[in-house]
Amino acid sequence: MDQQSRRLYWRKNLQYLAILLTFWFVVSFGCGILFVDYLDQFRFGGFGLGFWFAQQGAIYFFVLQIIIYVFLMNRLDRKFGVDEKGDAQ
């Protein structure tokens, strides 16, 4: 892979990370701390929604983001020809 392709690959990777971490911050900090009083008026599993986000929801969302990141990076690897199949050829 040439230098320009490496820069594009790395830039796209950083974009993915920035977007996903921003969403995680909004869910964990926003829903678990800032908006907890508003969200607690809704019930989820017998608990206030704000409490649920603070205790469980942010963790579930983080695991979901790991799955999304793996999907996006596999797609990016295929696009730039650095996936496992591309390396074996």
Image: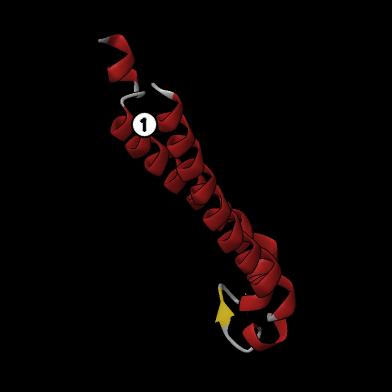
- The quadrant the C terminus occupies is top left
Note whether 59 is above or below 70 in the view shown: below
Note whether 41 is above or below 50 in the view shown: below
Q: Residues within 10 Å of mark 1 (few under 14, many from 20)?
A: some
x then y, percent, for residue 39: 63, 83
Q: Secondary structure at mark 1?
A: helix
Report the residue marked by disc 1.
Answer: 77
> How is the protein colored in the picture?
secondary structure
Residue located at (48% from left, 35% from top): 7
The one of 43 and 16 positioned closer to us in this rendering: 16
Furthest residue to the left? 89
x then y, percent, for residue 36: 70, 80
Left/right placement of residue 25 relative to residue 79 reads right
Furthest residue to the top? 89
What type is the residue that disc 1 sits on?
Asp
- Where residue 74 sits, quadrant-wise, is top left
- Where residue 27 sits, quadrant-wise, is bottom right
The one of 66 and 48 positioned closer to us in this rendering: 66
x then y, percent, for residue 59: 62, 54
Q: Residue 66: in sight, yes or no?
A: yes
Residue located at (58% from left, 85% from top): 42
Left/right placement of residue 4 relative to residue 60 reads left
Residue located at (41% from left, 38% from top): 73
Note whether 78 is above or below 37 in the view shown: above
Note whether 89 is above or below 66 in the view shown: above
Furthest residue to the right? 33
Give the number of marks: 1
- The quadrant the N terminus occupies is top left
Q: Residue 48: in sight, yes or no?
A: no
